[in-house]
Amino acid sequence: MGPVLRFLVKVVLMAGVFYGVAYLLNGIEVIPNPNGPLGEPGTYLWIALIFAVVNAVVGPVLRLLSFPFVLVTLGLFLLVVNAALLGITAALTDRLQVDGFGTAVVGGLLLAIGGWIADQLTERR
């Protein structure tokens, strides 16, 4: 599987994770657009794509700047970084709403677990 196809499959899988997170958590809401080019599923794909770009561009900078805190907390501060990435994604699109920091931390944790599973599924040969 080529890198572009792997990226597209991961975005589709993360769209499913966003659907599950929005379904499970009351504080995270996705406002679907039934009139969009791909309908309501297209909204989840769009949010997953924005999250992937934010994670690729801003994520490494946040992880580098927060490295001392990650080291002191033995990695638990990465939950705050994931919450910040989710908050940035919500700020960039009007289709995702996150209510509060605690909800963002739990949502970031679920997205991190879902992203890890998506990585494991796309890395298999």
Image: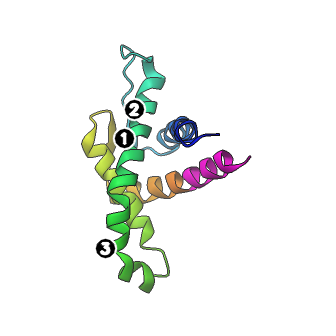
Camera-side residue: 74 or 105? 74
Q: Which amino acid type is shown beneath numbered disc 2?
A: Trp
- The residue that disc 2 covers is 46
Residue at the disc numbered 1: 50
Question: Does residue 125 appear to the left or right of 88 in the view shown?
Answer: right
Q: Residue at x 52, y 38 (%)?
A: 4
Dot 2: element? helix
Secondary structure beneath disc 3? helix
For marks 1 and 2, give the CA distance: 6 Å
Instruction: Give the magenta-colored segment's residue range.
Output: 113-125
Which quadrant holds residue 29? top left
Q: Amino acid at mark 3?
A: Leu
Three-letter amino acid code of the residue under disc 1: Ile
Secondary structure character of the magenta stretch overall: helix
Magenta stretch containing residue 58, yes or no? no
Q: Closest to the observer: 47 or 34?
A: 47
- Which residue carries the number 3 mark? 65
Which of the numbered marks, if any, corresponds to residue 98?
none
Task: Give how far across and how far down residue 123 sits, in percent.
Answer: 66, 50
Q: Quadrant of residue 100?
A: bottom left
Q: Tell me the element at label 1.
A: helix
Q: Residue furthest bottom?
A: 72
